[in-house]
Amino acid sequence: MSASTTHNPGHRRTWLQIAIYGAVCLTIFLVPTILDNDFLLNKYSRYLVFGILAIALSLSWGYCGILNLGQAASFGLGCYCMAMALKLRTVPVHTGDDGLPDFMVWNNVTELPWFWVPFHSLPFALFAGIAVPTVLAALVGWFMFRARITGVYVAIITLASLVVVNLLIIDQQRYTGGFNGITDLAQLELFGLTFDAYSRNSYYLVASVLAACLFAALAITKSKTGLILQAIRDHEDRVRYFGYDVAHYKIFAFSASAAIAGIAGMLYTIVMEFASPTFLDVPLSLSVVIWCAVGGRQSLLGAALGAIVVTGTQGALSDSGIFLQSWTLLMGMIFVASVLFLPKGLAGLAELAGERLRRLGRDTPPPVKTDVLGPVREGEGLA
Amino acid sequence: MTGYLALDEVSVSFDGFRAVDGLSFSVEEGELRCLIGPNGAGKSTALDMICGKVRPTAGTIFLQGRALNRLEEHEIARAGIGRKFQVPSVFRELTVRQNLDVAHSRQVGVWANIARFGHHADRDGLEKLAELVGLEDRLEVPAGHLSHGQTQWLEIAMLVAQDPRVILMDEPTAGMTVQETRKTADLFNRLKGKHTLIVVEHDMGFIKEIGDVISVMHQGRLLAEGSVGEIEQHAEVRAAYLGSGGISGA
Ligand SMILES: Nc1ncnc2c1ncn2[C@@H]1O[C@H](COP(=O)(O)OP(=O)(O)OP(=O)(O)O)[C@@H](O)[C@H]1O
Ligand SMILES: [Mg+2]
C-alpha cells in the first residue's frame, strides 16, 4: 500500500472543516434575509457574541489545556473600552459640562480622568479594547507559566484575577460608574455606518467579526504553533525536550484568547447599549466553560455553536417564563451530562455521525478506485 | 574536562539518598556509548541530569566545553541534546505524523511557527523516516493506539526527526521482539558517527551489536569502562550484578 505517500487525509480533513465553517458562517449571514425583526436580530446578535467568547476559550482550554475561569475579565475590559468611547460621544442632556460623563458629575468629579481622555478617539478605543485584555493576560500568563503553574491552580488564579478586576471596577465608581456601569451610550459610527443595537447593521457586524475570529483561530490551530499547543495540552513536559519554550506558547495561547474575548466584549457593548460589572462576573465566566463543554471545547465551531445553542435555549425558556428559576440547575445538569457522556461535546457527536456515514458508504460495493480509501483501513479488512 | 559531552563529578540526592554520586565520564563526538548497570544504579537519573530534567546538586555537565547546568530544558535541547525516555513518552492524542512534526523542531519560536502550515517537516523525509521504523501505514493513527513496541519506535523516530547532535536513549528495546530489536540495532549503527549517542540498555545481545565502549554504573558511581569483552570479565562488575541474575540476564 503506497497510498500513504501520495495522499494525506489530514489535508482532506482541513478542507472539509473549512467548508463546514464557511457554510455555518453563511447560514448566520442569511438569517436577516428571512427574519425581519430587529428585536430578534438584537437577541441573536447577543448569542453570536457569546459564540465569539466561546471560540476564545476553546483556543486556550480546548487546544492548549489552559482552563481559564477568568475569561469574563478580558470580555468585560473590552466592554468597558467600547463603553468609554461611546459615552464620550453622547450629547450630555441633563448634566455634564465639557462632555463630562453624567455619572462623574454625580460623583463630584470635575475633570475627565487622564485615562479617559484618549477614548475621545475611536481608533484608540478599538485598539485598547483588544490591547488592554491582551496585555493583562500576557502579564498574568507570564507569572503563571514562567512558574510552571498548571491545572487547577491556573483555574484558581484566573478566577481570582477576574474577581479582582470585577471588584476594582465596582469600587472605582467615580471613574467606572460602579454597580450601575456605563449607560446612555451613543451609537457606534464607523465607516460611515451607524450601528444601532436594533438593526441589521449591528447583526452583520457581529456576524462578520464572528466569522473573522473563527477563521483566524482556525488558522492558528492549523499552523505549526497550533500543533505545538496541542502537544503541550497532551504532554507538556515532553515538548520542552524538543527545544520549545512551553511558557512562550502558553502565554501566546492565553493572550490570543484574551484578545478575542476583548473583541467580543466590545461587540457586546454595542448590542447591549451599556456596560455593566455583570459583564465580567463569575457566573458569566463559568457559563463560558459550560458552553465549550457542551459544544465541544476541542472544536472552535463546536464551542461557538455550544454557546449559541445554550444561550438561545436559555433565552427561549426565560421568555416563556416557566423555567427561569430552575435554569441554573438545568444548566448544571447539562454540563455534568455532557462531561460524563459527551466528553467532546456536540462536535464530537457530529464527528462520530460523520464517521458512521462514511463507513456506511464504504460497505456498499467498492468502486474500482480503491486507493481513495486510504491506508488506515488495512487492519479492518476482515471485519 | 575534555570530550564532546562530559560529566564532571556530578551528584544528585533525593531526600538524602544519593542516586548519583560523583559520576564522571566523557563521550567523544560521533561515539555510541552504552551505559549499563543493575536496577537502581542511577542510569536514568544520569540521563535526566544531562537533559535538564533533574538538576545536579554538585558537579558540572559540559557539551563542547559549555556548561549546561544553568540552562532550562528547552535551552539544553536547543544546545543539541535529545532524549528518549525509559517510559515511552509520545503525544498520545496526536497522530503519528503530528508527533513527528512536533519533533522536527528546527524552528522553535511561536512567531516563526505561526505562519507555517501543512507539512511542517519535509514531507518525503518524514514518510521515509516512518517507513524506516515500520510506521508508514500508521501515520494518521493517534499515537495512543500504537502497541508498546510501535510506541518505542515512534519515539526513536521522533529523535531522528529532531536530529540533535547528542541522542540519549533510555532502554530503547524494552518490550521489543527479537526481530524488532535487531532492526533497532541496525538503525543505531546508522546513527553512529552522525550523532553522539548514549544508550542505556540491559540487553547484552543488543549491546554487543551496537556498542564500542561500555560504561558500567553501580550505586550512583562509575564502576568500570571498557569493551564488551573487558566488561564481561570484570570482577567488580560481576559482583555488582550478583543476585540480579548475572550481567547478561539483567
Ligand atoms: N525523583 C526521584 N525521587 C526519589 N528517588 C528517585 C527519583 N528518581 C530516581 N530515584 C531513585 O534513584 C535511584 C536510581 O534510579 P534510576 O532510575 O536512575 O535507576 P536506573 O539505573 O535507571 O534503574 P533501572 O534499570 O531500573 O531503570 C533509584 O533507587 C530510584 O529509586
Ligand atoms: Mg532507568
Image (tube, coloured by chain):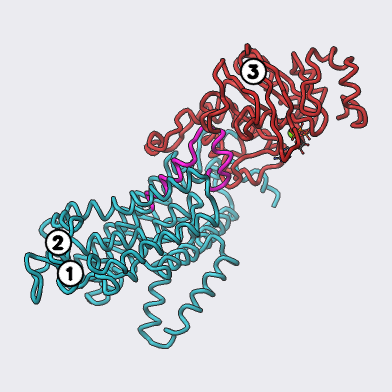
Give the residue type that dot 1 points to: Met
Tell me the chain of label 1.
A
Question: Ligand 2 lies in which image quarter?
Answer: top right
> Residue shown at 45%/61% (left/top)?
A159
Tags 2 and 3 both on a single chain: no
Chain letter corresponding to the colour cyan: A
**A240 in the magenta segment:** yes
Element type at mark 3: strand
Tell me the chain of label 3.
B
In the image, B168: left or right of A281? right
Q: Which residues are magenta?
A: A231-257
Q: Colour of chain B?
A: red
- Badge 1 crowding class, 10 Å Cα cut-off, few under 14, some 14 to 19, many 20 or more, is many
Tags 3 and 1 both on a single chain: no
- Badge 2 crowding class, 10 Å Cα cut-off, few under 14, some 14 to 19, many 20 or more, is some
Residue projecting furthest to the bottom: A322
Identify residue for label 3. Answer: B6
Instruction: Tell whether circle 1 marks a residue whose Cβ is less than 8 angstroms from ligand 1.
Output: no
**A208 in the magenta segment:** no
